[in-house]
């Protein structure tokens, strides 16, 4: 009986890239594509409300990175790469429109919003 003692894989045994390898290569490719897209003078890619397929693909990828970051699923190495290659990526494009205004609590004159006490006189 002969045992395979080499560190090389058996001929024909999984010489193709694994799914993990393909995912890592695609992640690096998307990072490069987003950086090139922004370097070309474009705004942040949108993940919805766009007919441009390239912008949408890049926008969905970037949006997924933000979601993964907030959920704690983004590795420290990927976060460091994103911060280095795409600074400002967590903020993204500025919001526009009526729903984008920063809402501040309305001040009630003469009352403190915490305890309901009369406001301090000047």
Image (cartoon, rainbow, N blue to C red):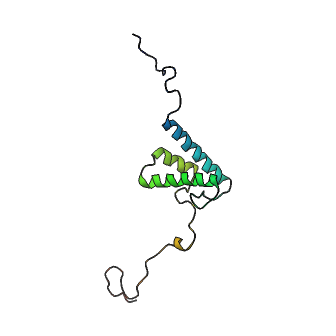
Q: Dividing the image into 4 quarters, which one contains the N terminus?
A: top left
Measured as percent of width and height from the top left, residue 25 is found at 55, 39
Instruction: Please determine whether, in this image, residue 67 is positioned above or below residue 23.
Output: below
Q: Quadrant of the C terminus?
A: bottom left
- Toward which corner of the image does residue 56 lie, by quadrant? bottom right
| Residue closest to the eye, 85 or 10 | 10
Which residue is farthest top? 1
Percent x, y of residue 62? 54, 53
Residue 107: image x %, image y %? Answer: 42, 82
Query: Along the horizontal axis of the image, is 119 left or right of 53?
Result: left
Q: Quadrant of residue 96?
A: bottom right
Which of 112/12 is in front? 12
User: In the image, what residue occupies the spot 46% across and 53% down?
Assistant: 69
Residue visible at 46% across and 20% down? Answer: 7
Image-based side of 36 in relation to 74, left or right: right
Q: Nearer the viewer, residue 97 or 16?
A: 16
Q: How many marks?
A: 0
Residue 42 at x, y percent in the picture = 66, 57
Q: Residue at x 32, y 85 (%)?
A: 117
């Amino acid at each position: 009986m002969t045992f395979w003692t080499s560190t090389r894989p058996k001929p024909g045994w999984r010489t193709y890239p694994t799914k993990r390898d393909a995912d890592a290569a695609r992640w690096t490719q998307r990072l490069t594509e987003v950086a090139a897209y922004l370097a070309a003078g474009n705004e942040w890619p949108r993940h919805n409300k766009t007919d441009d397929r390239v912008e949408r693909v890049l926008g969905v990828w970037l949006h997924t990175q933000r979601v993964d970051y907030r959920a704690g699923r983004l590795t420290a190495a990927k976060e460091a790469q994103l911060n280095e290659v795409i600074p400002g990526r967590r903020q993204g494009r500025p919001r526009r429109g009526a729903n984008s205004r920063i809402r501040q609590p309305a001040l009630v004159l003469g009352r403190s919003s915490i305890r309901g006490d009369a406001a301090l006189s000047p």
